[in-house]
C-alpha cells in the first residue's frame, strides 16, 4: 500500500512514516517544501541504514496520491492544507491525527476547533473524502525509535464503517498497537482533547506513557 503523509516532517508524521515503511508500506513524506521532506527522509534512512525502507520525500501534492493519506500538519493548518488537494483526495480514506493543544505553564490545554475537532474540520474541507480520526495518543519519539516496542490502544472514529476498518488496517500493522472502534466522528472531539491530559502526565512524570484501556482484554483487533 502507498501511504502519503501531508505535513509529514513534524514529529508525529516522521514517526508514523518510519513505522509504516518499516512494516512494508511505501510511504511518501509530504511537505509544503519538498526539499525539507527529502532531508527528513535522508535523516530517517541514515538513522536506520540496515532497514529496507520504501520511503521518499515530496510535496503535499505528491503525498496526496497515496492510497491512504494521513494529515499530520499542525492542527490549525490541517483544513487549509487539505482544501486545495480536494480533487486528489475524493473518495479516499484520509486519516486525521491532529490535536488542538496549547501549552500553559507546565501543562497542556485542549482547544476547541471551530467544528469541534480537527477531524471534523478536515471532513468539512473534504466533503467527498472518508475521514478517519486515529493515532492521536501515540508518542512521536517512541514511534521514531524502531527499537522501542509500542504498547498502546488506538481509538478510531469515523462516520463510515468501511473507512474506519481501512484506516485501522493501516495502523494495525504496527506491532504493539490495538485498534478500537470508538464510534462516529462526533467522538473525535473527546479523543483529541484527552491528548492534553496524556501529554501533561508525560511532562510531569518525564514519561512516554500511552493509552491502554482495561476491561477489553478479550479484544485483539479492530471490531468496527
Image (cartoon, grey):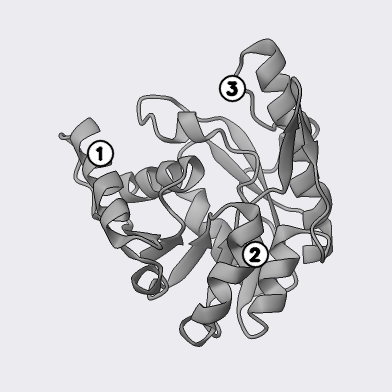
What numbered label is drawn on residue 43? 1
Disc 3 from disc 2: Cα separation: 25 Å
Horizontal and vertical percent for residue 61?
39, 74
Horizontal and vertical percent for residue 160?
70, 74
Is 50 on the left or on the right of 161, as rendered?
Answer: left
Horizontal and vertical percent for residue 17?
39, 49
Sequence-first disc among 3 and 2: 2
Quick check: 178 above or below 203? below
How crowded pointer 3 is (Cα within 10 Å; few <14, some 14-19, many 20+) is rated as: some
Where, quadrant-wise, is the C terminus in this rendering? Answer: bottom right
Disc 1 from disc 2: Cα separation: 29 Å
Is 33 on the left or on the right of 49, as rendered?
Answer: right
Is 34 on the left or on the right of 61, as rendered?
Answer: left
Q: Nearer the viewer, mark 1 or mark 2?
A: 1
Q: Secondary structure at mark 3?
A: loop
Residue assigned mark 3: 208
Q: Nearer the viewer, residue 9 or 3?
A: 9
Quick check: 189 above or below 174? below
Residue reaching furthest to the left: 50
Q: Nearer the viewer, residue 36 or 130?
A: 36
Residue assigned mark 2: 132
Amino acid at each position: 500500500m502507498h501511504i502519503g503523509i501531508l505535513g509529514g516532517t513534524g514529529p508525529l508524521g516522521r514517526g508514523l512514516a518510519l513505522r509504516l515503511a518499516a512494516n512494508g508500506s511505501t510511504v511518501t513524506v509530504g511537505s509544503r517544501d519538498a526539499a525539507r521532506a527529502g532531508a527528513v527522509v535522508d535523516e530517517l534512512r541514515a538513522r536506520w541504514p540496515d532497514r529496507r525502507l520504501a520511503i521518499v520525500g515530496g510535496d503535499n501534492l505528491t503525498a496526496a496520491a497515496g492510497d491512504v493519506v494521513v494529515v499530520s500538519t499542525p492542527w490549525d493548518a490541517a483544513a487549509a492544507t487539505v482544501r486545495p488537494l480536494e480533487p486528489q483526495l475524493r473518495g479516499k480514506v484520509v486519516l486525521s491525527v491532529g490535536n488542538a493543544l496549547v501549552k500553559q505553564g507546565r501543562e497542556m490545554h485542549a482547544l476547541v476547533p471551530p467544528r469541534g475537532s480537527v477531524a471534523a474540520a478536515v471532513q468539512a474541507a473534504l466533503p467527498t473524502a472518508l475521514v478517519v480520526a486515529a493515532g492521536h495518543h501515540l508518542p512521536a519519539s517512541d514511534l521514531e525509535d524502531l527499537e522501542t516496542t509500542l504498547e498502546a490502544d488506538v481509538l478510531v472514529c469515523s462516520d463510515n464503517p468501511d473507512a474506519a476498518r481501512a484506516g485501522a488496517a493501516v495502523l494495525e500493522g504496527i506491532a504493539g498497537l490495538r485498534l478500537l472502534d470508538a464510534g462516529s466522528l462526533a467522538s473525535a472531539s473527546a479523543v483529541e482533547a484527552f491528548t492534553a491530559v496524556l501529554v501533561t502526565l508525560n511532562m510531569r512524570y518525564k514519561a512516554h506513557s500511552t493509552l491502554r484501556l482495561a476491561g477489553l482484554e478479550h479484544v485483539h483487533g479492530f471490531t468496527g
